[in-house]
Structure formats: structure tokens, C-alpha cells
Amino acid sequence: MTIKSFPSSATPRLEINADGNLKIAGWASEVVEAQIQDESDLTVELVDNGLNIYAEDDCELSVPQTATLHINLVEGSLSISTVLGEISIQSVGGHLTLQATG
């Protein structure tokens, strides 16, 4: 398992695509942390006030609790917990679970 950390603000805008299952949990840190099996399956691009994230495998993200999430495609299941910012979801291929979201 590989863990990568990316500095952010308290309210980053995250645009996310995942080819596998995706789990997102909010935390009280101004860092976005990604856990993925193989580092080569993760692409992260720094953009104005946020990050574009593409995971080619199952991935777990820890994000600031007040992050804005724009999720374009998750081909597997998606779980989001403790994220209080705006959340938009376009397409999920599996189950969708939302817990303690804003």
C-alpha cells in the first residue's frame, strides 16, 4: 500500500475520477492523503485552489472536512463520510454510501 500526501487549503476543490472503488473520509487537516496499492495507478494534478485526482485502482482519500468534491466517475462503489463541503456526483458504477455529509 502506498500513501501519498498533498498540501491543500481548508476548502480545496477536488475533481475526482476512479476506475475502482473509492472511499473518501473528511478529517481535520489541510492535507489530502491518498492510499492506493500501486503509486503508478494514481495521478494528481495541482490546479487553482485544488487538485484533480485520477485513480486507476481502488483508492482511499482523506480530505479536509470542508472540501468541495466534484466526482465525475467512479466505476466501482463510492463511500463518502464526514465531508461537509459541497458534493456533486455524476456517475457511480456500484453502491453509493453517504454518511455525515453536508
Image: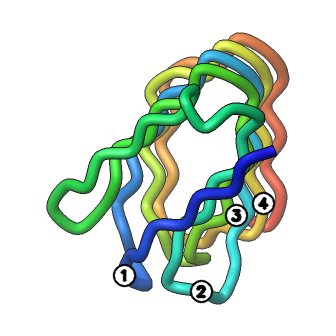
Q: Is residue 39 visible?
A: yes
Mark 2 or mark 3: whose residue is earlier in sequence: 2
Amino acid type, label 2: Ser
Above or below, comparing residue 74 to residue 7 in the picture: above
Could you tell whether 24 is left or right of 15 in the image? right
Please give the name of the residue rendered at 35% of the width and 60% of the height, measured from the top-left corner.
13
Q: CA distance from mark 3 to mark 4?
A: 6 Å
The alpha-carbon separation of the residues under discs 3 and 1 comes to 19 Å
Which comes sooner in the sequence, label 3 or label 4?
4
Q: Which residue is mark 4?
A: 81
Question: SS for tag 2?
Answer: loop
Mark whose residue sits in front, 2 or 3: 2
* Foreground: disc 1 or disc 4: 1
Q: In this figure, which residue is indicated by the disc labeled 1?
A: 9
Along the line of sight, which residue is nearer the eye, 40 or 82?
Answer: 40
Label 2, on which residue? Answer: 29
Is 19 or 39 nearer to us in this picture? 39
Residues under numbered marks 1 and 4 in contact, where contact means CB atoms less than 8 Å apart: no
Label number found at residue 86 = none
The reply to whether residue 102 is in sight is no
Q: Give x and y (percent) for residue 70.
A: 42, 43
The mark closer to the camera, 3 or 4, is 4
Image quarter of the N terminus = top right
Given residues 41 and 72, the one toward you in this image is: 41
Under tag 3, what secondary structure?
loop
Where is residue 20, by image quadrant?
A: top right
- Of the image marks 4 and 2, the number of the one nearer the N terminus: 2
Residue 7, x across and y down, in percent:
41, 76
Which kind of residue does numbered mark 4 sit on?
Answer: Ser
- Identified at 34% across, 54% down, the residue is 51
> Disc 4 to disc 2, how far (Cα)?
15 Å
Task: Verify CB contact (< 8 Å) between mark 3 and mark 4.
Answer: yes
